[in-house]
Image (cartoon, helix red, strand yellow):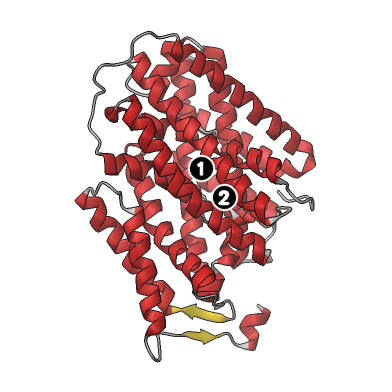
């Protein structure tokens, strides 16, 4: 949370590298194992270059306009259009909260050799959910220093995991499962994209344009790529089926539990806080602390029923919405230099993003080597540019005086 201080390049780097230190990132990296180590690393780095470039450019808008992420979307979509983006983001973040709590509970249960009953799982979810709520509520009361220390500890523990992995002389000769290069590339691009609606909440407080762009770009690229490679290498070298099995195989039970719990709390803290910021874009007078409790409770409840087997499809859903949406935002800001924030809704932006979402799933089915994000963003951008060149283009109704005051 912002305490009024400006964030320099090192601070921005550690903020975003810390955001990437997550069990979800490690687990997603483990999904790429069918490609093998060398090709897997190449795809991870390529995907993160693309995703982090889009992420950092979006953060630059928040810095230059000194506004939060979802309010930045008003520039392209108008006031009510930004509300739609906010709703999608709130749903995404509640989903991420649920995913993180499920992964944490399942990992604790496996690593500690705890009972596999449903009631015990629910108790773990409730316990970790309560810890997340406390973490967010007191983040502005000295807990930021603890959060930074936790991230540093997590990084050191991840280095220990890498060291143990390197101690294995032989990696799996043939990884189980199948995944295409395009699908693996998409999984590497989509994780940075999941932060698109959130990044300006933090880059708006950067000290300079350089610290904003390079701090966020390099921070998330380094942290997320590292997490993906840990997941990939851990499963390949231990010949386990998933990252929890790999942690068990490495024999770091207590340290593994620390990694799991701290990674869950420090990442879910950002999810809950940014969901609160998105809600405030719609309901600016809502009490922040109450929203923290409501959103954490919603994520905890969702964790009881979230179909974790659909995790990969959840990632694709995020990419299908936010890649086209922020393609339109980037085109509107950097190319057209327009500002629709004083309008109710910009239908040209809405329809262009919808075309991009449709294209995303078309390319996902085609399983193209370049993935789905890049072509869907190009198509959404082209549609928006075309809409802008049509005389009497699909327009945006101006806000009334009553709406401006609301």
- The structure residue drawn at horizontal position 29% and vertical position 42%, both measured from the top left corner, is 183
Q: What residue sits right under mark 2 in the picture?
A: 295
Residue 382 or 193: which is nearer the viewer?
Answer: 382
The mark lying in front, picked from 2 and 1, is 1
Q: Can residue 364 be seen in this snapshot?
A: yes
Q: Is residue 137 left or right of residue 173?
A: right
Residue 304 or 27: which is nearer the viewer?
Answer: 27
Q: Judge the density around disc 1: few (<14), some (14-19), many (≥20) Cα neighbours within 10 Å.
A: many
Q: Is residue 302 left or right of residue 148?
A: left
Q: Judge the density around disc 2: few (<14), some (14-19), many (≥20) Cα neighbours within 10 Å.
A: many
- Residue 380 to residue 38: above or below: below
Residue 182 or 313: which is nearer the viewer?
Answer: 182
Q: Secondary structure at mark 2?
A: helix
Could you tell me if the residues under marks 2 and 1 are in contact, i.e. CB atoms within 8 Å? yes
Q: Secondary structure at mark 1?
A: helix
- The structure residue drawn at horizontal position 37% and vertical position 86%, both measured from the top left corner, is 390
Looking at the picture, how far across and down is residue 361, in whole percent? Answer: 27, 56
The disc label shown at residue 97, or none: 1
Q: Is residue 48 left or right of residue 35?
A: right
Q: Residue furthest bottom?
A: 392
The disc label shown at residue 73, or none: none
Looking at the picture, how far across and down is residue 44, in whole percent? Answer: 40, 37
Task: Tell me which numbered mark, 2 or 1, is placed earlier along the sequence.
Answer: 1
- The structure residue drawn at horizontal position 59% and vertical position 34%, both measured from the top left corner, is 265
- Residue 95 to residue 131: above or below: below
Looking at the picture, how far across and down is residue 108, in whole percent? Answer: 49, 22
């Amino acid at each position: 949370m912002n305490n009024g201080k400006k964030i320099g390049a090192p601070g921005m780097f550690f903020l975003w590298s810390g955001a990437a230190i997550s069990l979800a990132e490690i687990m997603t990296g483990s999904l790429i194992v069918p490609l093998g180590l060398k090709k897997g690393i190449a795809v991870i780095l390529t995907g993160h270059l693309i995703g982090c470039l889009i992420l950092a450019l979006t953060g630059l808008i928040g810095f230059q306009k000194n506004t939060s992420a979802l309010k930045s979307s008003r520039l392209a979509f108008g006031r009510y259009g930004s509300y739609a983006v906010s709703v999608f983001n709130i749903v995404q973040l509640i989903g991420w909260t649920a995913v993180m709590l499920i992964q944490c509970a399942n990992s604790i249960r496996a690593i500690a050799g705890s009972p596999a009953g449903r009631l015990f799982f629910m108790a773990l979810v409730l316990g970790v959910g309560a810890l997340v709520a406390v973490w967010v509520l007191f983040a502005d009361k000295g807990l930021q220093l603890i959060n930074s220390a936790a991230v540093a500890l997590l990084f050191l523990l991840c280095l220990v995991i890498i060291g143990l992995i390197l101690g294995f002389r032989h990696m799996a000769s043939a990884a189980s499962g199948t995944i295409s290069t395009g699908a693996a590339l998409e999984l590497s691009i989509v994780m940075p994209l999941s932060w698109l609606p959130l990044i300006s909440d933090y880059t708006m407080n950067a000290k300079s344009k350089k610290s904003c762009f390079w701090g966020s770009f390099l921070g998330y690229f380094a942290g997320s790529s590292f997490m993906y490679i840990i997941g990939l290498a851990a499963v390949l070298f231990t010949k386990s089926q998933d990252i929890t099995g790999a942690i068990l195989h490495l024999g770091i039970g207590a340290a593994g539990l620390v990694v799991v719990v701290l990674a869950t709390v420090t990442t879910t803290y950002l999810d809950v806080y940014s969901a609160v910021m998105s809600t405030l874009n719609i309901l600016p007078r809502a009490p922040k602390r109450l929203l923290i409790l409501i959103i954490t409770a919603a994520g905890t409840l969702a964790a009881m029923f979230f179909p974790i087997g659909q995790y990969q499809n959840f990632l694709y859903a995020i990419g299908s919405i936010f890649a086209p949406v922020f393609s339109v935002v980037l085109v509107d800001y950097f190319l057209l230099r327009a500002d629709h924030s004083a309008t109710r809704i910009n239908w040209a932006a809405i329809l262009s993003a919808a075309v991009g979402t449709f294209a995303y799933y078309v390319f996902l089915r085609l399983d193209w080597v370049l993935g789905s994000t890049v072509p869907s963003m190009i198509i959404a951008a082209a549609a928006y540019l075309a809409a802008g060149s049509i005389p009497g283009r699909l327009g945006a109704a101006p806000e009334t005086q009553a709406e401006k005051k609301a």
